[in-house]
Image (cartoon, helix red, strand yellow):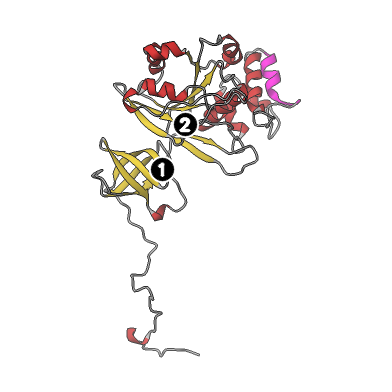
Amino acid sequence: MRRYGKHTDEDDIRSRPNRKGNRPRTHIRPKHEDAAEGMVLTVDRGRLTCLVDGRPVMAMKARELGRKAAVVGDRVALVGDLSGKKDTLARIVRIEERSSVLRRTADDDDPYERVVVANADQLAIVTALADPEPRPRLIDRCLVAAFDGGLEPLLVMTKSDLAPPDKLLELYGALDIPYVVTSREELADGGAADRVREQLDGRITAFVGHSGVGKTTLVNALVPEDRRRTTGHVNAVTGRGRHTTTSALALPLAGSGGWVIDTPGVRSFGLAHIDPTRVIHAFPDLEPGTEGCPRACSHDEPDCGLDAWVAEGHADPARLYSLRRLLSTREPTEGD
């Protein structure tokens, strides 16, 4: 049965009143074409410090972004109060497309990946040569995350006054990773910082390493005008350091146009999100050999086409060994 006649008027249509008394929501969102561009410097409990036109601006994420989170290094669009004055707050209305991402999971069984840093060009993996002892499997995991996320790796070895770097250099020699060796005395007089800075000029570099390796001390030497709290002591029983950096922070590298991103110390680096087929892209000398691999090849099985590719002399066997060692890090082992 029809509720209304053939010729109904607007006033004849009954509508449900809005009990809140506000305007009804619409699915049409503003484009914010006049939004200012910024870069996320740090994130702290839902508040994001962004660099806008050379000044820090406090901001929060707009509701329209939903669950999409901005991380350090993200390029964002902001509206609202962009003065940067105390007690002002802008809104992040758009997160631009990322050129690279450093991601990790809590462990290898965790299905939820976490983006640590966005848009970095380089990942500096900091490891001590002693006190605490190097953890090659953790280094391997960081390398896999770098290759997967589109970052170029840099190996920074600290505390060379306590142990020589030869063993680690031999282990990673086939990967042709650039490296810098430092000692505590060289950090104190600035010589080591200068050598590291040469690898950072004009680039955005994220620093990662487990606790106690001297990562934050190195960052302080690189950016002395923005010193962070120095690292804590290394536990004599466990051989592990204490976390002293609790949030990622982007710092400008004076005179070079580069950026240093200091991240909290890690004790594990889950790789549940890593697709092995993406890691092979970091090995251009081996990648053509995958054409002879069976479907869904793990590159570490009897029928893998890479064995024949290397046997025919197309690549160094040490490179294939390095690839398989990196891929094996996705399998958790005790003490990793």
Q: Main secondary structure of the magenta part?
A: helix
Picture layout, residue 75 above or below residue 304: below
On residue 14, the disc is none
Residue placed farthest to the right in the image?
302
Q: Is residue 24 above or below residue 81?
A: below
Q: Is residue 177 left or right of residue 302?
A: left
**Could you tell me the amino acid type at mark 1?**
Asp
Q: Residue 151 in the image: state x and y as whole percent.
A: 48, 28
Q: Which mark is residue 244?
A: 2
Query: Where is residue 125 shown, x and y percent of the image?
Result: 51, 23
> Is residue 289 among the parts visible in the rendering?
no
Mark 1 vs mark 2, CA separation in Å: 15 Å
Where is residue 328 drawn, in percent x and y? 67, 27
- The residue carrying mark 1 is 44
Say which label, 1 or 2, has the lower sequence index.
Answer: 1
Q: Quadrant of residue 50?
A: top left
Which residue occupies the foreground of this view, 294 or 70? 70
Label 1: element kind:
strand
- Which element carries disc 2, helix, strand or loop? loop
Of the two numbered discs 1 and 2 in the rendering, the one whose residue sits closer to the viewer: 2
Going by the numbered disc 2, the residue's amino acid type is Thr
Q: Would you identify the image quadrant in which residue 292 lies? A: top right
Range drawn in magenta:
302-312
Q: Residue furthest front?
A: 236
Q: Is 311 part of what is drawn in magenta?
A: yes
Residue drawn at x 70%, y 20% is 307
**Among the 4 quarters of the image, the one containing residue 64:** bottom left
C-beta proximity under 8 Å, tags 1 and 2:
no
Please state the horizontal and vertical placement of residue 111, each as a whole percent of the image: 61, 44
